[in-house]
Structure formats: structure tokens, C-alpha cells
Image: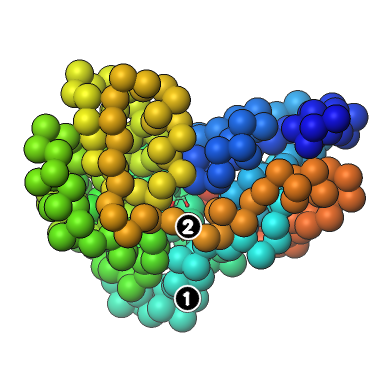
């Protein structure tokens, strides 16, 4: 029996469902029941009929799934797959900002620990941040942890006053402008599709800015045939599968999230066999970090 068949068989026996982010390896995306961006996956995680959720992604994703579904078992194929940006904010700074600004909303990117979410007013993802911030009654927004997404959202919601935090995604932060310009020079007809975790210099030379799902939908709906993609290279698989007649180019220094790439079929099989790497969240952390997540699902509808 192949490893894929073994996973399928065990999944049925254990009443499990597999969720995967677009940044994981193609063969892992292939065994997933649901593949998507962070917003889609957090919505899908609510109301699944299976008892066990196997989350092929990084730890904040599994943690959010557990917080939203406390009665379910959530298993991570690799417990060390973590998002460095998820830790790039702290409680002291949040408290300082709350004391400094009246009428402040702490807006927390879903790429954050539950520990940070619990001190926040609402969560957002790159797919819904603009929509949600626009709906907040507060004038002042402290956006954590990602400064790049914060600056992008601020540019779309000029009526709010933003306070920035110095977090970033190392993969998107280090996208090299010259490499994007080189790709544009090599493919003058191509559109540049960019994730808002990239710095402003990259957004400024882009034709479309959106989440991973946004980028995939835009490429599919476009009449153009060539695209330069400024995000993690895992999206290439879905883009090429859905658009065999189109060309996708990435920057020369391939943007690769090593944490997402830790997820392998062998590890998925192993946790299904053993039940290892279960996500645990204390009751109080679940209650407190669940509120901003639920508010996001409500406002993001
Ligand atoms: P989205 O999939 O929500 O666009 O987020 C990108 C990302 O960096 C996930 O870790
Ligand atoms: Fe975190 Fe960036 Fe990796 Fe996404 S791509 S999980 S934001 S390090």
C-alpha cells in the first residue's frame, strides 16, 4: 500500500480530516480534504463533522483550530513548525499602547500566538483585514505583529490612525525589489501579484495585492497569461494546476518558508498512527483568545 493510501485508510478509521495551507509541499496538499489561506482554513475548521483535525501548517494555525473547536482533537504533523512572526509582539507594548491612546483597538493578525491574541480586540487575516478594520468603531488601531500588513491596511483605511509594531514575516520581508524588477524586465507582459506581508517597495511595483487565495483567484480570473508572484513558492502548485495555459515566475531568491516545508507525508502518517503532537490550550487561554477569533469570523462574513 502506498503512503497516500495508508493515510486515507487511517484517516477514515480515526474519523480524521486533513487541512493544509497553500505553502506546504504539493504532495501534502494532494492528501488534504481542505486547502486554503488562513481565513478559509479558520472558517472551515469550525463545524467539521470529524473528531480529529490534522493541520498541515504552522503552530498558530493548529492553535486557532483548537481554540475554535475545543471539543476536537487537533494534531500537528510537526510540532516544531512555527511561524517566527507569531511571536513578534508582546503584552507590555500592548498595555503601553492601551494606556497611551484612547479609543484604541488592538488588531491582531492571525499569524500570532494564542498568548498574544488573548490581549487583542479582534483578529484578522490578510484576506479580511481591510474589511474588518473599516468596521471597527475605534479611531486608533494598534496592529500586531506584522508592520508590512499594517502599513498596507493603513493605506486602504486612511480614516483610521495606525500605531505600528515591528514584526514581520522573514520570507516576505526579504523579497528583493531588484529581483522583482529583473523579472518584470524579463517578462514585460506579466502582472505582479503580491502578498501584503511584503514591504511597501514591493507593493508599489505590484498590480494586485492580496492573500494567497486572493492571488490564486486573481490569476485564474485574469485574461493575462504571465504573472510574477511575490509570495511563498508553495502557491505555484495550485496556480499551475488551475492554469495550464499560464506562466508563473518567482523571484530569483526563491521565497521558501522552511517551517511550512517541515510537513511531510511521513509525519502525517505518523501522527495518525500515534496521536502525537496534540494541541492543548488551557481553558482560560481558549476563552480569551477565542473572543477576537470569533469576532473576526463574525465581521469577516
Ligand atoms: P494567507 O494564506 O492568509 O495569505 O497568509 C499567508 C501566510 O503567511 C500564512 O502563514
Ligand atoms: Fe510565518 Fe511567513 Fe512562514 Fe507564513 S510564510 S508561516 S508568515 S514565516
Using a 10 Å C-alpha cutoff, classify the residue at mark 1 as few (fewer than 14 neighbours), some (14 to 19) or many (20 or more).
some
Q: Callout 2 environment at 10 Å: few (<14), some (14 to 19), or many (20+)?
A: many
Asked where in the image residue 269 lies, by quadrant, the reply is top right
Res. 103 image quadrant = bottom left
Where residue 254 appears, x then y in whole percent? 36, 55
Q: Position of 218 compared to 155: left or right? A: right
Q: Is mark 1 within 8 Å of ligand 2?
A: no
Q: Looking at the image, which is closer to me, 295 or 77?
A: 77
Q: Of 204 and 69, which appears nearest the observer?
A: 204
Can residue 283 be seen? no
Separation of residues labelled 2 and 1 (CA atoms): 23 Å
Horizontally, is 149 left or right of 12 in the view? Answer: left
Q: Secondary structure at mark 2?
A: loop
Nearest to the eye among marks 2 and 1: give it. Answer: 2
Q: Are marks 2 and 1 in contact (CB under 8 Å)?
A: no
Which residue was labeled with disc 2?
Answer: 257
Question: Mark 1 sits on what residue?
Answer: 90
Amino acid at each position: 500500500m502506498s503512503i497516500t493510501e495508508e493515510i486515507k485508510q487511517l484517516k477514515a478509521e480515526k474519523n480524521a480530516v486533513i487541512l493544509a495551507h497553500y505553502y506546504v509541499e504539493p504532495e501534502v496538499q494532494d492528501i488534504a480534504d481542505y486547502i486554503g489561506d488562513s481565513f478559509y482554513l479558520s472558517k472551515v475548521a469550525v463545524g467539521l463533522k470529524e473528531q480529529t483535525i490534522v493541520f498541515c501548517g504552522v503552530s498558530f494555525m493548529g492553535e486557532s483550530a483548537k481554540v475554535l473547536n475545543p471539543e476536537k482533537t487537533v494534531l500537528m504533523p510537526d510540532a516544531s513548525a512555527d511561524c517566527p512572526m507569531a511571536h513578534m509582539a508582546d503584552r507590555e507594548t500592548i498595555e503601553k499602547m492601551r494606556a497611551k491612546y484612547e479609543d484604541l483597538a488592538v488588531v491582531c493578525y492571525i499569524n500570532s500566538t494564542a498568548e498574544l491574541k488573548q490581549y487583542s480586540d479582534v483578529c484578522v487575516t490578510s484576506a479580511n483585514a481591510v474589511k474588518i478594520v473599516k468596521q471597527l468603531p475605534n479611531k486608533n488601531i494598534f496592529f500586531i505583529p506584522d508592520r508590512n500588513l499594517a502599513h498596507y491596511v493603513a493605506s486602504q483605511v486612511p480614516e483610521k490612525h495606525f500605531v505600528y509594531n515591528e514584526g514581520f514575516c522573514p520570507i516576505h520581508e526579504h523579497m528583493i525589489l531588484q529581483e522583482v524588477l529583473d523579472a518584470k524586465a524579463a517578462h514585460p507582459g506579466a502582472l505582479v501579484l503580491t502578498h501584503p506581508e511584503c514591504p511597501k517597495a514591493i507593493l508599489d511595483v505590484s498590480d494586485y495585492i492580496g492573500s494567497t487565495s486572493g492571488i490564486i483567484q486573481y490569476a485564474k480570473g485574469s485574461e493575462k497569461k504571465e504573472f510574477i508572484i511575490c509570495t511563498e513558492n508553495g502557491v505555484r502548485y495550485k496556480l499551475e494546476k488551475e492554469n495550464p495555459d499560464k506562466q508563473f515566475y518567482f523571484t530569483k531568491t526563491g521565497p521558501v518558508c522552511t517551517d511550512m516545508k517541515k510537513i511531510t507525508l511521513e509525519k502525517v502518517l505518523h501522527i495518525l498512527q500515534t496521536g502525537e503532537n496534540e494541541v492543548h490550550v488551557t481553558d482560560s487561554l481558549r476563552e480569551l483568545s477565542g473572543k477576537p477569533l470569533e469576532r473576526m469570523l463574525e465581521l469577516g462574513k
